[in-house]
Image: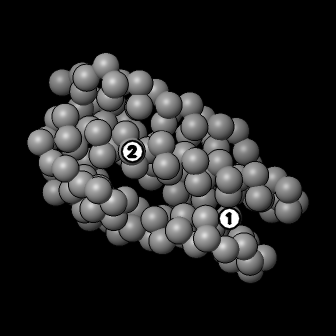
């Protein structure tokens, strides 16, 4: 359980760094690209924390981000609407990691505010789940 608490703490700190940036207004290219980078590492920390949560609290072993999202829906950490958004988030994260395209960067940045809200709610659910 201690390792899970550490992972959740790391995810919380990563999310905090993402939320420091202005995500809901026009920004210059440098801030936009920094936000996308922070989005990438925040999601990495979050899905790995969720993976460990599922293993330790639910006895489920998932090996991929989308498998983790689906399992989180199954155990009630995410609603259906949140899971749909989380699957889109995974797709966007995959696009940002494997290619760079100016139009893609603008499109993904336009979703970061929603993604940050989702990740905050998801993290809160897991934090509450280890307390109860």
- The residue closer to the viewer here, 128 or 101, is 101
**Residue holding disc 1:** 109
Residue at (61, 71) in percent of width and height: 98
Which percent across, then down, holds residue 24?
A: 69, 57
Q: Which image quadrant for residue 19?
A: top right
Residue at (56, 31) in percent of width and height: 13
Which percent across, then down, holds residue 88?
A: 45, 70
- Quadrant location of the C terminus? top left
Q: Earlier in the sequence, mark 2 or mark 1?
A: 2
Dot 2 alpha-carbon crowd within 10 angstroms: few under 14, some 14 to 19, many 20 or more: many
Q: Which image quadrant for residue 53?
A: top left
Asked if one can make out residue 76 in the rendered structure from this viewpoint, the answer is: no
Q: Secondary structure at mark 2?
A: helix
* Label 2 to label 1: alpha-carbon separation: 22 Å
- The residue closer to the viewer here, 8 or 97, is 97
* Residue sitting farthest toward the left: 59
């Amino acid at each position: 359980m201690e390792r899970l608490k550490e992972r959740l703490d790391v995810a919380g700190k990563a999310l905090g760094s993402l939320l420091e940036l202005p995500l809901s207004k026009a920004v210059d290219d440098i801030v936009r690209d920094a936000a996308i980078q922070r989005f990438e590492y925040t999601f990495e920390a979050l899905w790995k924390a969720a993976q460990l949560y599922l293993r330790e609290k639910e006895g489920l072993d998932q090996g991929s981000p989308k498998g983790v999202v689906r399992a989180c829906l199954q155990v009630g950490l995410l609603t259906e609407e949140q899971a749909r958004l989380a699957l889109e988030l995974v797709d966007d994260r995959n696009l940002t990691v494997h290619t760079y395209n100016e139009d893609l960067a603008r499109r993904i940045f336009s979703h970061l505010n929603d993604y940050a809200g989702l990740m905050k709610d998801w993290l809160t659910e897991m934090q509450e789940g280890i307390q109860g």
